[in-house]
Image: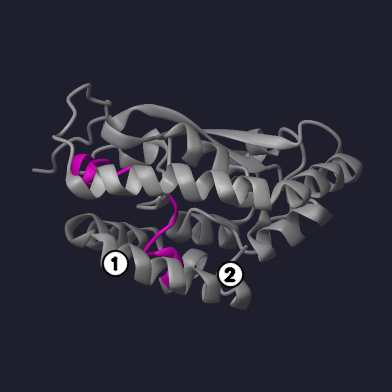
Amino acid sequence: MTQPRTRFVPSATAPAVTLHSVIMRLIDIVVGTVLLAFFAPVLLITSLGVFLDSGLPVLYRCPRLGLHRQPITVLKFRTMANGSHHHLEALLSEDEELRMEYNARRKVRNDPRRTRVGSFLRRTSLDELPQLLNVVVGDMSLIGPRPYMPHELDGRPEAGELLSARPGITGLWQVNGRSDLTFEERIAYDLEYVRGRGLVMDLKIAVRTIGAVVSGRGAY
């Protein structure tokens, strides 16, 4: 008999702090602050570009699950028409091919809701620069598993394990195909990271992220 899917409910129980998590938090604060200062001109220019192209708001605030299942708000430059996230269900219901692509990847390669500037920001990964603020304040890490939406982990037995690490701007799945991967493949890479995470793995991911961003593979 098929077991009913249960809704994923965040827990207040937090696992023990590890040496790796302490060291990574220190690195996140220092490197995140330096990167924020370095990219300040880019952040300002990009903000102006989004505003001139499609108005306010400049930032998109997305509710996600953070470390130890705590709710966080992930910041990104808005890449779609204002309020377009409310029209996703209607869009998918009208196009079976788009619906199949979204169900597999949780993304659409040629999303018609995307703005002109938004398409450029997605290809260059500049839309993710505001997440450096999330890193500095402690909601995210520079490297870690993907920050998941609450409904994405409904009924998944791996939820607790996936959320035992602070979500990252980049991670193992981002350097192995990004949005070209299916959702299940992303889950598998995130689990691999959580189970084997350490400073050596983090360094390798950081180096590979540069190549992934330059190549633009899977960025849409």
Crowding at label 2, few (<14), some or many (≥20) Cα neighbours within 10 Å? some
Question: Residue, x 24% and y 39% (percent of image)?
Answer: 155
Res. 10 image quadrant: top left
Label 1 belongs to which residue? 201
Question: Residue, x 57% and y 74% (percent of image)?
Answer: 217
Label 2 belongs to which residue? 213
Res. 8 image quadrant: top left
- Which residue in the rendered view is the most extreme toward the top? 12
Compared with 134, 169 (above or below) is below
- Residue 52, given in percent of the width and then of the height, sits at 91, 43
- Residues shaded magenta: 158-175
- Residue 94, given in percent of the width and then of the height, sits at 65, 49
Check whether the beta carbons of the residues at disc 1 and disc 2 lie within 8 A of each other. no
Res. 88 image quadrant: top right
Task: Give the side of residue 149 with respect to residue 164, left or right.
Answer: right
Residue 171 appears in view: yes
Task: Give the side of residue 212 with respect to residue 114, left or right.
Answer: left
Crowding at label 1, few (<14), some or many (≥20) Cα neighbours within 10 Å? some
